[in-house]
Amino acid sequence: MSGGRHTVPVDVHLLAVRDEDRGPEVLLSRRAGADMYASGLWHAPSGHVELETVVDAVVRETLEETGLVVDAADVRAAVTVHHRPPEGQARVGIFFEVRRWSGTPRVVETDKCDAIGWFALDGLPEPMVAYCRAGIDAYRAGAPVALHFQEPGDAIAYDPAADRLALVPGHADRSALPADAVRAFVEQAVGRITTWSDVSWARTESRVWRARGAEGGTWYVKIHQSDRFHQREVAALRGWVAGLGAATPRLVAADAELRAVVLTAVAGRSLHGATYPPEEQRRIFRRIGQLAAAIHTSAPARPAGGMLPLGKLERHLDGARPHLTPGDEEFIRTMAEKAAHLPGVDVVPTHGDFQLRNLRWDGSAEALYVIDFERSEDGPAVRDFVRLSDAWHGRPDLLQAVMDGYGRPFTPEEEDQLTVLSVLDAVSGISYGAAHSDPELVERGHRTLARLRSAQRPVGKKPAAVWQEGTS
């Protein structure tokens, strides 16, 4: 039996979170004062619950410590931490996430705090209160409850060598962690992992986790959906990708049996869904063109290969047919028939999935990064512009920026290849997206077919405006 009932204090902690180019940031303040507990250590705004609800308490403490006004309706439960300090009574801390407020954070209680600021969730300051650090790490891992029982003699400040955090997964969180064999493989490669965050797309074929180490390092762990994808990504990362330098992640470890890789993290935010002022957009797209050129010149070009990949067309058509508009299938078959008569173009290393989802932009450093090489293989250079072309449609200035960065326009032969490859990709995208509940992929396929059909440029003739002008 336990040692009997006991009561514990209840604390509330504010996790005010904002999204920036380098990723999410959290608001922290630094305790100060000769008689202040944990003086000199960074901590989230927090306090004891009085004769009030825990939500009312965090709203009150936020205003008293930071000057921010938070509506109770904007308070979200983040994680509950059962904490025992090195000395003294155990307590329960309830951490709340808030992403909306009014006002500008400032030091209000100058007798208790001497600094306040925003810090990246993957770059927390030191020294920091271990209790608060445990709550933030548990929040990042997505655990609803965490234990943080420190031992006598442990420091109040966070010490990676004495990290006492233990996550308690929720009923729906068990699948969020990698399998035991994958976790063991990763820890053999980079050391103990304290935080796993599932950052996969909503698909079952492959999984990706962000893993944070006990000493603060961050890696990405990926399980490929097939042996072929695993082999292609590993071969690319061990080969031509290394020549791109800091623009790509580095392969730390690979396991063919698990189909797993461990990769270093890169900075920036995904360009998928991101919005920027027009001038910055043009700078970004020029850098995209430069990156594409670097990929395509990372190894010598080889003579033209065989025909374009038409072998799976009938299977993709069968899956896409219920979703096609009148006239689509006839157009698709016409393009496939003409593809057999296209002259070949030289083949080079290609990324294979060069689109905004896999490109990351760090605006503060003006740096562009590319990830996800599982579709990498040699092919025509324009293969890497198939999915990217949807991003410049209707924006001739963005197409021009890409071409400026790339260093040359497409040749007429490449224009023809790009048209046919885009049609084939649209069909496979509609088929796959419909079967795997990916509405964005389906819609992109429809946009591509509509754009190309409206252009109606005969393949093999002088290029029309479909690529050069970015309009239909």
Image (cartoon, rainbow, N blue to C red):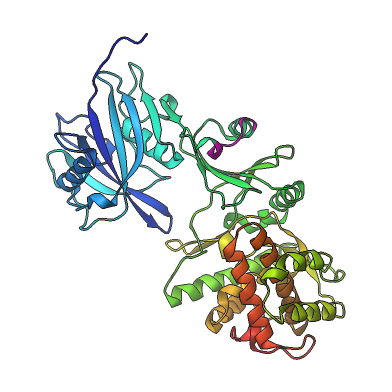
Give the left or right position of residue 410, taking residue 102 as reference.
right
Residue at the spot x=43%, y=45% of the render?
Answer: 122
Residue 363 position, x and y percent, is 44, 63
Which of 188/134 is in front?
134
Q: Nearer the viewer, residue 469 or 336?
A: 336
* Residue 383 falls within the magenta-colored stretch: no
Residue at horizontal 81 percent and vertical 76 percent from the top: 336
Residue 308 vs 55, above or below: the answer is below
Residue toward you, 401 or 395: 395
Q: Quadrant of residue 390?
A: bottom right
Q: Is residue 290 visible?
A: no
Position in image of residue 293 (x %, y %) = 66, 69
Q: Is residue 68 above or below residue 216?
A: below
Q: Residue at x 41, y 24 (%)?
A: 162
Q: Quadrant of residue 47?
A: top left
Q: Position of residue 394 (x, y in %)?
A: 55, 82
Q: Quadrant of the C terminus?
A: bottom right
Residue 167 locus on image (x, y percent): 44, 30
Q: Is residue 406 above or below residue 359?
A: below
Quadrant of the image occupied by residue 222: top right
Q: Quadrant of the N terminus?
A: top left
Residue 349 seen in the figure: yes
User: Could you say which is closer to the camera, residue 1 or residue 423?
Assistant: 1
Give the residue displayed 87% in from the left and 77% down from the top. Answer: 340
Q: Is residue 327 left or right of residue 439?
A: right
Please state the extent of the stretch shown in magenta in the rendering.
Answer: 175-181
Report the number of numbered marks.
0
310 left or right of 20 in image: right
